[in-house]
């Protein structure tokens, strides 16, 4: 039988441990703001960082699991209202609120990427933005038949951060660029195809998974523990009553690659043709056959033109950039977006006034002045003063 030991916790993140048959313990961190779909705020980031740091150095903790309270979401993103308020008060300036939130969020993400011990994320339900940052940093990323995973930053005037500069360019074909531009909602099968998920279980396997963790033959070897957890999840996946299914992204890779090839101007012209009112019979048939694509394109074209430009620039970054360098680049870009781009207006329209009618700075990508978006990539800090200089 497993034993659940509750530890000191805040109300917003619950920490506990599972005592295993081998005498070792598995740490469990549960995001616990169900009404807000477990969206991350700075207090939660700080609590997670402190507890994970303690668990990493605790020899009795052999693995960690992250999950979310309720049945709707693991984590629907970051709670950016405080950043919005600071940005509105001092327009054009890089604020401490934005710097601290993104800095500490990225440090937490980097901690997960470099944790060493196995980290599993139960990625059921909604996983977006900051939630994806937590998930992609884990070694064992579990998706289910109910997973709905997206990077919707273009809708709030941001761009796919939390390491997107690193992992989007490593996805098959042009799928990373497509996901960043369209905020397309991935199924569990889609997420598995692009590498966001690397294990699949059913929604109702959660209790069995936690119970099975206690019976694993955990050892003092991190490598052996990684393999043991992989083996457990592979065996459980074989018994899933609802199979993984087909990935829309995989089935339409050729179409996606065709749409997302070339300059940003070329891409915009190409995708507009897919949803114009009077197009060729072939394109009309495509729209009927691919309603998911029409929805994705409409979201893209309604998003911030600056964000689209940034996503396209992001897709051209060198794969030689280290994960640490990507986070450093993103911190500068994120605070610049809050100060000088469409972030404040996007958050206002979607989360504050909720009129869903953002007034973007530029009417379309063609109206963006040459060099404007590239300027947002310039860091506000030099190497010696960079808030993430400690990442290596």
Image (cartoon, rainbow, N blue to C red):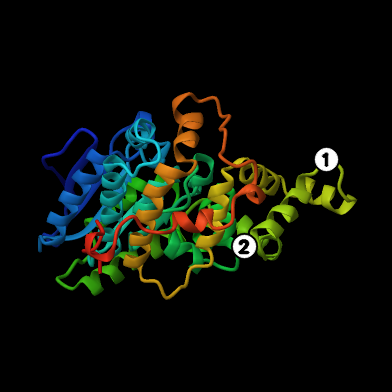
Residue visible at 64% across and 47% down? 367
Where residue 289 appears, as percent x and y from the top left, is 77, 49
291 left or right of 228 in image: right
Mark 1 or 2: in front is: 1
Q: Which mark is residue 136?
A: none
Element on which disc 2 rests: helix
Rate crowding at label 2 as few (under 14), some (14 to 19) or many (20 or more) other CA atoms within 10 Å: some
Q: Which residue is mark 2?
A: 250
Which residue is the extreme one toward the right? 281
Where residue 160 appears, as percent x and y from the top left, is 46, 53
Q: Which mark is residue 277?
A: 1
Q: In front here: 243 or 322?
A: 322
Where residue 215 appears, as percent x and y from the top left, is 23, 59
Disc 1 and disc 2 in contact, CB within 8 angstroms: no
Q: From where the camera sits, is residue 94 visible?
A: yes
Where residue 74 appears, as percent x and y from the top left, is 38, 43
């Amino acid at each position: 039988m497993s034993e659940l030991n509750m530890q000191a916790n805040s109300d917003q993140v619950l920490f506990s441990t599972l005592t295993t048959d081998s005498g070792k313990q598995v740490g469990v961190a549960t995001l616990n703001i169900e009404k807000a779909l477990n969206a991350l705020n700075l207090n939660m980031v700080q609590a997670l960082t402190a507890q994970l740091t303690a668990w990493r150095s605790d020899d009795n903790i052999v693995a960690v699991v992250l999950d979310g309270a309720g049945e709707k979401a693991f984590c629907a993103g970051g709670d950016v209202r405080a950043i919005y308020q600071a940005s509105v008060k001092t327009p054009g300036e890089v604020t401490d609120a934005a710097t601290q939130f993104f800095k500490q969020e990225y440090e937490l993400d980097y901690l997960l990427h470099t944790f060493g011990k196995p980290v599993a994320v139960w990625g059921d339900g909604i996983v977006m933005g900051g939630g994806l940052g937590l998930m992609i940093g884990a070694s064992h990323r579990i998706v289910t038949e109910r997973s709905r995973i997206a990077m919707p930053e273009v809708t709030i005037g941001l761009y796919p951060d939390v390491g997107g500069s690193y992992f989007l360019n490593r996805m098959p074909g042009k799928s990373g660029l497509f996901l960043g531009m369209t905020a397309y909602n991935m199924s569990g099968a889609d997420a598995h195809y692009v590498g966001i998920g690397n294990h699949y279980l059913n929604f109702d396997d959660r209790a069995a998974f936690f119970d099975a963790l206690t019976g694993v033959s955990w050892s003092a070897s991190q490598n052996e523990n990684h393999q043991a957890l992989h083996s457990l999840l592979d065996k459980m996946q074989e018994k899933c009553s609802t199979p993984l299914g087909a990935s829309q992204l995989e089935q339409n890779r050729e179409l996606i690659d065709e749409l997302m090839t070339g300059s940003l101007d070329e891409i915009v012209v190409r995708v507009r043709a897919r949803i114009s009112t009077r197009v060729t019979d072939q394109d009309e048939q495509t729209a009927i056959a691919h309603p998911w694509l029409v929805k994705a394109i409409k979201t893209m074209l309604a998003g911030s033109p600056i964000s689209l430009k940034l996503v396209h620039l992001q897709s051209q970054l060198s794969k030689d950039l280290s994960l640490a360098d990507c986070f450093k680049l993103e911190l500068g870009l994120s605070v610049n977006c809050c100060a000088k781009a469409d972030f404040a207006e996007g958050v206002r329209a979607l989360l504050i006034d909720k009129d869903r009618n953002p007034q973007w700075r530029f009417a379309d990508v063609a109206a963006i002045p040459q060099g404007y978006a590239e300027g947002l990539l310039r860091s506000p800090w030099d190497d010696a003063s960079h808030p993430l200089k400690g990442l290596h």
